[in-house]
Amino acid sequence: MNAETVNPQILALAGVFQAAELVRQAASHGAWSGFAATASLESLFRLEAETPEEIYGDRKRLRLGLETLIGVLSGEAEHQLPLQCAVTLLQLEKKFLRHPAMMEAVGEGLDRISSETAALEPHEREDAQAEQVAELYTKTVSTLTPRVVVNGNPQYLHNPRNVNWIRSLLFSGLRSAVLWEQLGGGRFNLLFGRKRLLRQAEAALQG
């Protein structure tokens, strides 16, 4: 299956589950897949992009999300935590879209962060962006309900860098949830289209 025949909905949904799985990794282990996390963080700054390919680039950058989504749709028990996180993000997305002033503030904030960190070296830039995005998340999205409850090891949940990345990754998951909605995704698809979504996710992973 080539890029043209992959349903963009499945890639947007994979973006949600990638963020959710990265949050689980950070909260439970204090470390996470850097390749996938970079893709998720960078997606926040591609505000004018309209397709998953433009937002994430190569589909390989969504591999973790597709694998997690396949695990969830296959009923694998070890994916329960990312599933809970992803469901909350999809619920939160609907609340977020009802707050145009907040959406505007988020867009302006992300533009500012992108400009202020552009000259930094990649590793320094990512941590700086994560710190500023986390602050923006705290001032905006975290005031909405339902709030995302992140469970994990207290040692890692009290580490400032981990917390910054967790909040940034949640933000990226919300960004993917918005895209999922814009592309026509919804609760009906998840509730009654599980087998179809599984086939699409497997095809996208193999492509």
Image (tube, grey):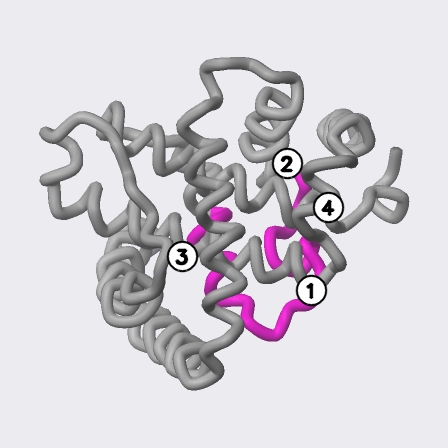
Give the residues drawn in magenta, as a range: 39-60
Name the residue located 56 percent from the left edge and 54 percent from the top edge: 176
Badge 2 or badge 3: first in the primary sequence: 2
User: Going by the image, does 183 lie left or right of 34?
Assistant: right
Do the residues under discs 1 and 3 have CB atoms within 8 angstroms? no
Pointers 4 and 2 in contact (CB under 8 A)? no
Quarter holding residue 72: top right
- Circle 1 sits in a helix, a strand or a loop, which is it? helix
Q: Name the residue carrying label 4.
A: 188
| CA–CA distance in space, label 3 to label 4 | 24 Å
Q: CA distance from mark 4 to mark 2?
A: 27 Å
Residue position for label 3: 171
Label 1 amino acid? Gln
Is 52 one of the magenta-colored residues?
yes
Q: Mark 3: which amino acid?
A: Phe
Residues packed near mark 4 inside 10 Å, few (<14), some (14 to 19) or many (20 plus): few
Q: Which residue is mark 2?
A: 60
Label 2 CA crowd tier, 10 Å (few <14, some 14–19, many 20+): some
- Mark 2 to mark 3 CA distance (whole Å): 21 Å
Mark 4 is on which residue type?
Answer: Phe
Residue located at (69% from left, 67% from top): 50
Question: Cβ–Cβ below 8 Å for labels 1 and 4?
Answer: no
